[in-house]
Amino acid sequence: MASYAKLLEGYKAFRSQYLSQENSAWLSEAKEGQSPKVMIIACSDSRVNPAIITRASLGDIFVVNNVANLVPPYHESGNTHHSTSAAIEFAVIHLKVEHIVIMGHSGCGGIRALMADHDNPKPENPEPAKHYSFIRPWMQIVDDAAVFTDQEKAAADIESRAKICEQRASLISLKNLVTFPWVKEAMTQDRLKIHAWHYDIGEGRLLEYNETSEEFKELT
């Protein structure tokens, strides 16, 4: 794992290349603004970096990171403070991105926390420091993803159910995306497409949800 000192050394190498003559044309354009065509909503997990996974260059993707790569449903009230919602608004209305990708992944800590809540119901008088957090209310956005019948639990081990839950959560976020009026309008006008991906950390594989077959299939 990278130490702080290693990050500083990496920055020095980056800046040397960034200011090189071969990068001057791009740098000149970048100073004036950005125009990415793709937005990716990814998890904050340190093992899942969409720019590295897709080998994207600076300026290629507009990235939002949050716990478990969630999209909250649209709320018209100005009292909500979802930074993800603000980023979606900016990406669609101002940047006019053509694709939005929800990128889930294996081994997601947020999803495991959600599943743990379902498997171990909260006690009547929980200790505040132990049982209340910012993560729990945030993960309630995709609460239904962790609902399994007794038969489903008996037929699949915890790892299999975690993968199902991760993918279900991404599909809930995908549905929530369409509740934003400007997203729905752009999709209706065929200016925007939305996607759900699932990244397998151990195998380095990306799967994409296929609406026709209603399953995640490997990107080729």
Image (cartoon, rainbow, N blue to C red):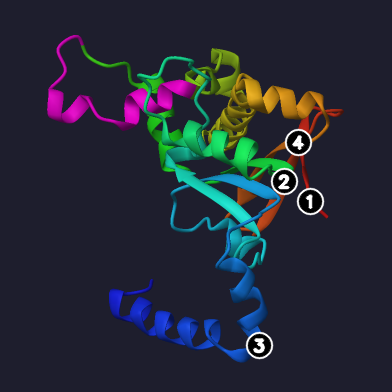
Q: SS for tag 4?
A: loop
Q: Check the image and report above or below for 127 versus 150.
A: below
Which residues lie in the magenta part?
Answer: 124-141
In the image, is residue 142 part of the stretch drawn in magenta?
Answer: no
Real-space Cα distance between discs 4 and 2? 20 Å
In the rendered structure, which amino acid carries the disc numbered 3? Glu
Sequence order check, earlier mark of 2 and 3: 3
**Quarter containing the N terminus:** bottom left
- Numbered tag placed on residue 219 in the rendering: 1
Q: Residue furthest right?
A: 212
Real-space Cα distance between discs 3 and 1? 32 Å
Q: SS for tag 1?
A: loop
Q: SS for tag 3?
A: helix
In the rendered structure, which amino acid carries the disc numbered 2? Leu
Sequence order check, earlier mark of 2 and 1: 2
Q: Which residue is mark 3?
A: 22
Q: Which residue is mark 2?
A: 207
Q: Which residue is mark 4?
A: 192
